[in-house]
Image (spheres, rainbow, N blue to C red):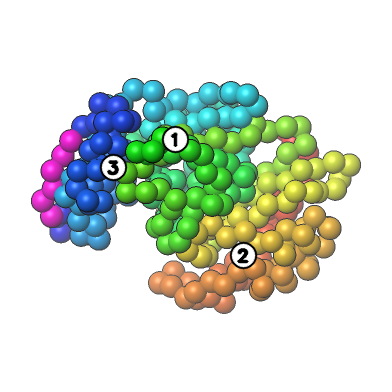
Amino acid sequence: MKPVAFAYAKARSVDHAIELLGRDDGRARLLAGGQSLIATLNMRLDAPSLLVDLNGIGGLDGIARRNGHVEIGALTRHVAAEHSEVIRQDVPLVALAMPHIGHPAVRNRGTIGGSVAFADPAAELPACLVALNGEIDIAGPHGSRTVKAEAFFKDLFETALGPRDVLTAIRIAAATPKRRTGFAEFARRHGDYAMVGLAASAEAENGDLSEVRLAYFGIGATPVRARNAETAVAAGRLDDAVAALGEDLAPADDVQASAAVKRHLAGVLLRRVAAQLRKPAP
């Protein structure tokens, strides 16, 4: 299939993009890497009247340390994050997740901001942001604002972005010697969307864990915090943590796996990731 007809405009700045988004009564869409958008257009799951291309805007890409945080510009390609020494050292959870995002051709073109804004519930980066208590910077017609990741992801493909908002960057606190992270997923083939995945972070001291954050993906409409399991992992009760997933998670059957299979896989991943959290930081 081919998309329905649409107009095209190349934004010169973030403000220009916001202006363009206001011209078509919410029917305009932003184009960054296009790895998700173009597929939805071709399948006619979306039919915008206007595509606003962000790729001509300077300053929306790049990875930098600032005030104890790592800021990643929205137009930063996945491949740049995958090979970034800053990401590897200061945001190791994202470094663990990057090779699982699509295939090399997708990572060469896809963008960090596009992945977060699209908010696919089976995508890795939204769950990583929730696990790391990250923030999202947004520019809109009424100025700029910052939204915590857990408040950003609202429902299936629904976020805190308004029809004239532009995601400009994500921000994550840089790793400390006490931070531990873990990541694992089950997919039918490497690079496919995960049937179930888990991104996690914690603080470790003297062999004890605290501030445990477990963010599952591929198992709900948004990244899902397993809060009861978090408490049990922090207490060192792994069997109880796996059992608690029955309360924390409510997966549905889909074309990839039944709800029962997803719950089982969630427990297997929790055991693997919990072991990663208890390993000394490299």
Q: Position of residue 162 (x, y in %)?
A: 37, 49
Residue annotated with mark 1: 144
Q: Can residue 167 be seen by looking at this rendering?
A: yes
Q: Residues within 10 Å of mark 2 (few under 14, many from 20)?
A: many
Q: Quadrant of residue 19?
A: top left
Residue at the image position 57 percent from the left and 29 percent from the top: 70
Q: Quadrant of residue 268?
A: bottom right
User: Of the numbered discs in the image, which one, if any, rests on residue 171?
Assistant: none
Q: Secondary structure at mark 1?
A: strand
Residue at the image position 65 percent from the left and 62 percent from the top: 226
Q: Can residue 79 be seen by looking at this rendering?
A: no
Q: Position of residue 106 (x, y in %)?
A: 35, 42
Residue annotated with mark 3: 30
Q: Position of residue 167 (x, y in %)?
A: 41, 39
Residue annotated with mark 2: 266
Between label 3 and label 2, give the one nearer the viewer.
Answer: 3
